[in-house]
Image (cartoon, helix red, strand yellow):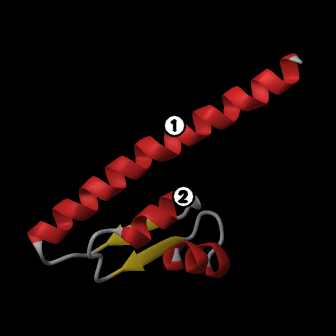
Amino acid sequence: EVSDWFISRFTKDGDVVLDPFMGIGTTGVSCKKYDRGFVGIELSLMYFGMAYNSLCLSEVAITANEQNHLTEKESRTED
């Protein structure tokens, strides 16, 4: 995804990204994935709602991926 590529290559861990035209929140999702802070601005309440949902769903997905990674790591150490 384009936003993942830009966020991962042009920012560092802990940086804060400002997205003044947030739309559906794609940049925010990439920021969460790569441990960047995110400030999004959106005038449209409809788009803000979609961005909010995207960010909430990405939090669940990222948490689930981290949990799966830890479980895989633990099972490898038990072998």
In the displayed structure, 33 sits above or below 57; it is below
User: Mark 2: which amino acid?
Assistant: Lys
Q: Earlier in the sequence, mark 1 or mark 2?
A: 2
Q: Amino acid at mark 1?
A: Ala
Q: CA distance from mark 1 to mark 2?
A: 12 Å
Q: Which mark is residue 4?
A: none
The residue that mark 2 highlights is: 33
Circle 1 sits on which residue?
Answer: 64
Whole-percent x and y of residue 59? 42, 47
Q: Is residue 27 left or right of residue 24?
A: right
Task: Please state the horizontal and vertical placement of residue 3, each as a whole percent of the image.
Answer: 50, 76
To which quarter of the image does residue 53 belong?
Answer: bottom left
Query: Picture coordinates of residue 43 (x, y %)?
Result: 14, 78
Tell me the quarter of the picture where residue 8 sits.
bottom right
Residue positioned most to the left: 45
CA neighbours of label 1 inside 10 A, class few (<14), some (14 to 19), many (20+): few
Tell me the element at label 2: helix
The tally of labels here is 2
